[in-house]
């Protein structure tokens, strides 16, 4: 009972600190130090110093700033414009037509950026004006963009999978491989819904464009070659075993710089802007990881995670009941925190429960990212909603209503991955068995 009271007090204390606007990382550290001072007699300062150093002194974590820098460089190229031009001719005869370019464009850009916000902003700047000009339904255009932008969290190289791997000491390469099939599945669900919606709402679709000759479509497809080469260089090197995720991240930076130079967008100004943007984002994420590590160490000293895991085991909850409760918990948490903060904040508390329930930690990482994806489009703190609000000027609640069908599709994806865990585990098991 003492541990339960302590856990509730620490949780309320953290919420109060976050409500004041304090940085998430500092709030995590403060609560962790308070837990140590209250419950155990070890020196809190020494624990914090060694824990922070151990958390950030990780070779796998070096991939994080590299992938962020790669995304920042690509954000300033013509990559989105080239993808739109290369994909559009092939989508004209499919129900929903150019709306599918939103979905496929986000899926492709997610495979080279790893960031949900960067994917949404980059594709949105190109697609929304084009779809509006051609008379596509505004709700569908904005909703598909916000929903598909979340693919940046799941399709590798995913920044949040790197964070999860670092926080839980799991193989980042294995997590990347596990995210491929669920990412394709989610994109397929979005495209399927778009097709059904277009067939049921023919009056809201613009007139079909003129048929593009086959040879012209092939010629336009050449504009996809740079991004395909980039994906092959980064992801292919990991899957083929030629490079670790960290080494592949460096390969991605070099290729991104080459692509920026080839498109004429690599200038001294854009280079420095990309470097500054990557430095700020990387520092923020690593500071959050350090704060979470302090809280994790404090929880270990207090014994709260072990007590919670024991409580779950005593209740004999089924894995489905546990996952249902966790899904609701993460969705509510996502209304107030960003995805990375959710992962590092809950990892030390949730994982003992997950292990006690007999769930695979790699699979749980993919499940967690799918649920966290929902937080990107839930008000009041949905990063993708903020990005689209900046692009369109609409109220965030209006954008959220437009995105609701795609939020429901994410729930369907979570149900599918829970019922069929092989969706996440089959590919890594197959590739590692070779």
Image: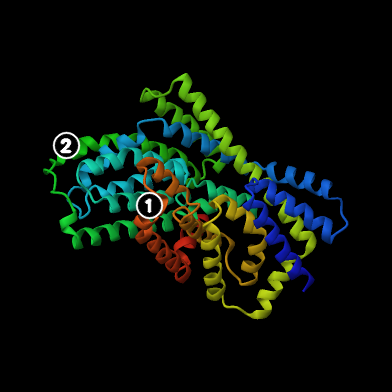
Q: Residue at x 79, y 71 (%)?
A: 2
SS state under label 1: helix
Give residue 94's mark: none
Q: Residues within 10 Å of mark 1 (few under 14, many from 20)?
A: many
Which residue corresponds to the image point at 24% horizontal and 58% vertical from the top-left?
Answer: 195
Q: Is residue 129 visible?
A: yes
Give the left or right position of residue 134, taking residue 122 as reference: left
Q: CA distance from mark 2 to mark 1?
A: 36 Å
Residue for point 54% across, 51% down: 338
Residue at point 51% right, 41% down?
A: 242
**Image position, residue 36 (x, y; %):** 81, 56
Disc 2 versus disc 1: nearer the observer: 1
Residue 126 sits above or below residue 201 on the image: above
Q: Secondary structure at mark 2?
A: helix
Residue position for label 2:
216
Query: Which quadrant of the figure has residue 304?
Result: bottom right
Residue 249 appears in the figure:
no
Q: Please, which colouring scheme is shown?
A: rainbow
Q: Quadrant of the N terminus?
A: bottom right
Give residue 111's position: percent from left, percent from top.
42, 44
Q: Which class describes the residues within 10 Å of circle 2: few (<14), some (14-19), or many (20+)?
A: few
Which residue carries the number 1 mark?
Answer: 399
The vertical placement of 412 against 172, above or below, is below
Horizontally, residue 247 falls left or right of residue 269, namely right
Indicate whether 287 appears above or below 367: above
Residue 72, position in %: x, y?
47, 34
Q: Nearer the viewer, residue 339 or 230?
A: 339
Asked if residue 66 lies left or right of residue 86, the reply is: right
């Amino acid at each position: 009972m003492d541990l339960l009271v302590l856990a509730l007090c620490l949780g309320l204390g953290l919420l109060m600190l976050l409500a004041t606007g304090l940085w998430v990382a500092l709030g995590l550290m403060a609560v962790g130090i308070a837990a140590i001072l209250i419950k155990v007699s070890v020196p809190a300062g020494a624990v914090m110093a060694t824990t922070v150093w151990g958390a950030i002194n990780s070779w796998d974590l070096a991939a994080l700033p590299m992938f962020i820098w790669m995304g920042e460089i690509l954000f300033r190229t013509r990559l989105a414009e080239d993808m739109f031009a290369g994909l559009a001719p092939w989508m004209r005869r499919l129900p929903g037509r150019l709306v599918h370019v939103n979905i496929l464009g986000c899926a492709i850009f997610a495979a080279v950026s790893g960031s949900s916000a960067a994917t949404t902003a980059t594709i949105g700047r190109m697609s929304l004006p084009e779809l509006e000009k051609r008379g596509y339904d505004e709700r569908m255009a904005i909703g598909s963009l916000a929903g598909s932008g979340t693919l940046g969290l799941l399709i590798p190289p995913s920044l949040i999978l790197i964070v999860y791997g670092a926080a839980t000491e799991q193989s980042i390469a294995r997590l990347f491989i596990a995210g491929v099939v669920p990412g394709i599945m989610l994109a397929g669900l979005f495209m399927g819904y778009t097709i059904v919606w277009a067939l049921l709402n023919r009056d809201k679709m613009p007139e079909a464009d003129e048929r593009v000759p086959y040879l012209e479509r092939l010629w336009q497809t050449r504009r996809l070659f740079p991004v395909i080469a980039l994906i092959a260089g980064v992801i292919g090197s990991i899957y083929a075993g030629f490079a670790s995720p960290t080494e592949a991240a460096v390969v991605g930076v070099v290729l991104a710089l080459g692509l920026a130079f080839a498109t004429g967008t690599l200038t001294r100004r854009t280079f420095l802007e990309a470097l500054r943007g990557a430095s700020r984002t990387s520092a923020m994420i690593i500071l959050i990881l350090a704060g979470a590590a302090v809280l994790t160490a404090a929880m270990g000293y207090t014994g709260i995670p072990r007590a919670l895991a024991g409580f779950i085991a005593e209740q004999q909850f089924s894995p489905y009941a546990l996952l249902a409760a966790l899904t609701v918990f993460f969705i509510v948490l996502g209304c107030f925190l960003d995805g990375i903060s959710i992962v590092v904040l809950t990892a030390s508390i949730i994982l003992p429960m997950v292990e006690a329930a007999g769930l695979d930690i790699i699979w749980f990482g993919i499940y967690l990212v799918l649920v966290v994806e929902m937080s990107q489009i839930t008000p009041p703190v949905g990063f993708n909603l903020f990005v689209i609000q900046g692009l369109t000027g609409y109220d965030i609640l209006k954008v959220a209503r437009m995105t609701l069908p795609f939020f429901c599709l994410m729930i369907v994806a979570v149900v599918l991955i829970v019922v069929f865990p092989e969706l996440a585990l089959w590919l890594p098991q197959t590739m590692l068995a070779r």
